Amino acid sequence: MPATIQAVYRQFNPTEPLEAGDPRYVDCNQVRGIPSIFEQLSLPLLDPPPRTLLFSGHIGDGKTTLLKQLAERLEREDHFVAFAQADNLLDLADVDVEDVILLILVAVDQRLRERYGATLQDSRLQQRLKEVWELLNRELSPNKIEVNTLLVKLTADMKVVKGIRQELRARLRMMQGPTFLEVANECLDHARQIIKKNNKQQLVVIFDGFDRMIGRGRTPDVSMEQRLLLDQASRLSSIEVHVIYTASLSLARRQHENLRARYGQSPIIVPLIPVLKRDGQPNPKGLEALKEVIAKRLEQADMTREQAFDTEATVERLCQVNGGYLRGLLALVRAVCAEALAVHSDLPLTTADAEAAIQRLGAQLRDNARPYHKELQAVLDTHTLAEVDDIKQQLLLDQHLVYHYYENGDYWYDVCEPVKEQLSGRSS
């Protein structure tokens, strides 16, 4: 592939998580301050009773990539892992426990079929799902319909048709005899028997995408995410399988102690890659990690940083202004490519291209920051969120106006660089 601006652009897709083994992957856990992240996630899964773990961090900072790395490691350690992408399968504005149970069964059944050609075979579950399907006035053809077909049909309808979603939940809750949860747990026990016959230790479900829940709960001041992951924690923990759910950074922070009390373990949080230390001094290790992220991407386009950029200072400027937010860095490089193509057709990307992209990014962030100048100044002065109320904390974190780091045993916070430069009286 020729060394073109378009070739650079293609390698910096900000929404593409990296699969395990992808040569573009850079292990940044040490510089983030979380070298034991995989051990924190995997060791609790060795306990005989199933565990529920929460995994959190900024949206777009590599949690999905880390979970895919974790899944591959767990498989190598003879565990059986089903990976479910919640936002592909659920309406994240309206989620309840029954939806989660169904989706866990779908994910496990699909993985069993992929791996062993096996499927969840439980006559009681099949009968219950068939009854629900018929009560929803749906025709069954043929009369003998398999569990996996019913699961897929029901979960598909739950996502797209709100009326069916509510009716299905009600029907599942009103099951006579064994509850839906009890029947589901029998199915999961059956799945464990299958994997043990194949010399696997634990059944693990990784449920990515929960941190993107956007709806409200039954009261305006409670988010859908809080109602599900906190208020219904006991029901989620009653699903007899090891599950890792992603959770938003704002929920993990605000409800840290309550979540730990309910799940028996604190949410495991992924901080950003620091390019500065808490005292404002440069963090060379963080900067080098981000430069390596860029270099690895360029290698897949058969070029070096020296070929792609006019100077090393241009690369460093992009990394510094980005603040260590991986999705933001990838998007920023793409923005530089767009600015470059408006002026010249060939590499290298120049300092002028980079500054044009940074100016555009800065304008958007500063516009978003205008209602929160008082709170942002407090974060800049104290590197904490102590003077920011809960609702504004969530807004500042979700909009990436404030970044979350870890250093020397403490979490600390900083304002994104374009807004920080404005607050400090400097222009970006």
Image (spheres, helix red, strand yellow):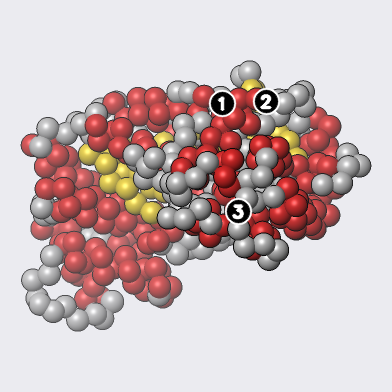
Mark 2–mark 1 Cα distance, whole angstroms, equals 9 Å
Closer mark to the observer between disc 3 and disc 2: 3
Amino acid carrying mark 2 in the image = Asn
Image-quadrant location for residue 361: bottom right
Closer to the camera in the image, 111 or 236: 111
Point out the tag, 2 or 1, that comes first from the N-terminus: 1
Q: Are marks 2 and 1 in contact (CB under 8 Å)?
A: yes
One can see residue 123 in this view: yes
The location of residue 172, given as percent across then percent down, is: 30, 62
Q: Are marks 3 and 1 in contact (CB under 8 Å)?
A: no
Please tell me which residue is depicted at 34% across the width and 51% down the height of the picture: 84
Point out the tag, 3 or 2, that comes first from the N-terminus: 2
The location of residue 46, given as percent across then percent down, is: 29, 26
Q: Which residue is mark 3?
A: 347
Residue 31, which numbered label?
A: 1
Image-quadrant location for residue 157: bottom left
One can see residue 236 in this view: no
Q: Under tag 3, what secondary structure?
A: loop
Mark 3–mark 2 Cα distance, whole angstroms, equals 29 Å
Please tell me which residue is depicted at 56% across the width and 57% down the height of the picture: 5
Label 1: few (<14), some or many (≥20) within 10 Å?
Answer: many
Quadrant where the N terminus sits is bottom left
Side of 367 where 231 appears, left or right = left
Q: Which residue is mark 2?
A: 283
